């Protein structure tokens, strides 16, 4: 119907697509939908996209939107939202997710990972400990650098996926999961309710529908 009316692009918003609550079957349906839209000659774009939205490039997705804050899903509401200070969340590229800064520091130390070398972090922080100390210092505004880190890191991930074939994206995601699942489960600063099984779910959904 969209093709018949002359529509050549569309914007997709899957309400409440939370990586911790969404099953593989839902991700498979989204992948099929995006591919069907693309195959029909319509350029689809994705609102509120986490890394799964980036992976949908291989299904024909033309672009994603993401903001500076740590929320990566949205729901329609007619109620007002309360104010309050912004929470400090650091985007961990290997996990494709945000963590509180103390949890980030512990995780990266357990994984024996070097400090992030993005242009923001390399200019702002000497080490993971330095990141933690900066957050504890009330005189330092940590929000600006960690927002910028998120923006430049997501942009880099998008460009990387665009330059990869499907197999390379899947392999990289699996490698990150295998490398980080043990440190993630061992980290005391990460809540036991926080899971990382969304990574293999994304991989399986994409692989089942596109291979």
Image (cartoon, rainbow, N blue to C red):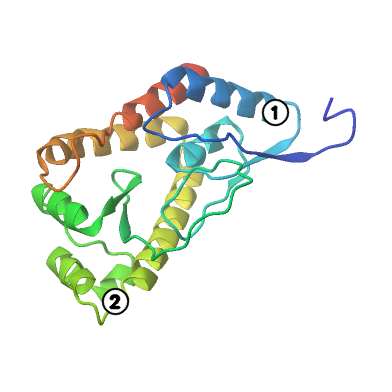
Element carrying mark 1: helix
**Viewer-proximal residue among 158 and 81:** 81
Residue labelled with disc 1? 37
What residue is drawn where x is 25% and y is 54%? 100
**Quadrant position of the N terminus in the picture:** top right
Q: Is residue 29 left or right of residue 52?
A: right
Instruction: Work out whether 147 lies above or below 210.
Output: below
The spot of residue 123 in percent (x, y) is: 29, 76
Mark 1 surroundings: few (<14), some (14-19) or many (≥20) residues within 10 A: many
The answer to whether residue 119 is above or below residue 208 is: below
Q: Which residue occupies the foreground of this view, 162 or 198? A: 198
Where is residue 40, by image quadrant? top right
The answer to whether residue 39 is left or right of residue 46 is right
Q: Residue furthest bottom?
A: 139
Q: Which residue is mark 2?
A: 123
Residue 90 horizontal/vertical position (percent): 31, 57
The local secondary structure at tag 2 comes to helix
The numbered dot on residue 111 is none
Determine whether 124 is above or below 79 in the image.
below
The location of residue 73, given as percent across then percent down, is 49, 42
Q: Can residue 91 be spotted in the picture? A: yes
State the residue at coordinates (35%, 71%): 145
């Amino acid at each position: 119907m969209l093709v018949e009316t002359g529509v050549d692009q569309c914007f997709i918003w899957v309400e409440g697509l939370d990586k911790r609550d969404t099953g593989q079957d839902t991700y498979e349906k989204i992948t099929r939908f995006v591919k069907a839209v693309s195959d029909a000659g319509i350029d689809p774009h994705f609102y509120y996209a986490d890394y799964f939205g980036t992976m949908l490039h291989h299904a024909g997705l033309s672009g994603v939107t993401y903001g500076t804050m740590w929320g990566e899903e949205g729901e329609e509401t007619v109620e007002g939202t309360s104010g309050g200070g912004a929470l400090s969340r650091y985007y961990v590229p290997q996990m494709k997710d945000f963590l509180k800064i103390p949890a980030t520091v512990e995780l990266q130390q357990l994984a024996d990972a070097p400090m992030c070398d993005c242009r923001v972090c390399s200019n702002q922080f000497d080490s993971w400990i330095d990141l933690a100390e900066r957050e504890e210092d009330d005189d330092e505004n940590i929000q600006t650098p960690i927002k910028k880190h998120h923006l430049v890191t997501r942009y880099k991930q998008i460009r990387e996926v665009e330059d990869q074939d499907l197999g390379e994206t899947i392999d990289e995601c699996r490698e990150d999961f295998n490398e980080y699942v043990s440190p993630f489960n061992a980290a005391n600063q990460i809540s036991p309710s926080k899971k990382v099984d969304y990574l293999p779910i994304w991989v399986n959904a994409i692989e089942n529908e596109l291979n």
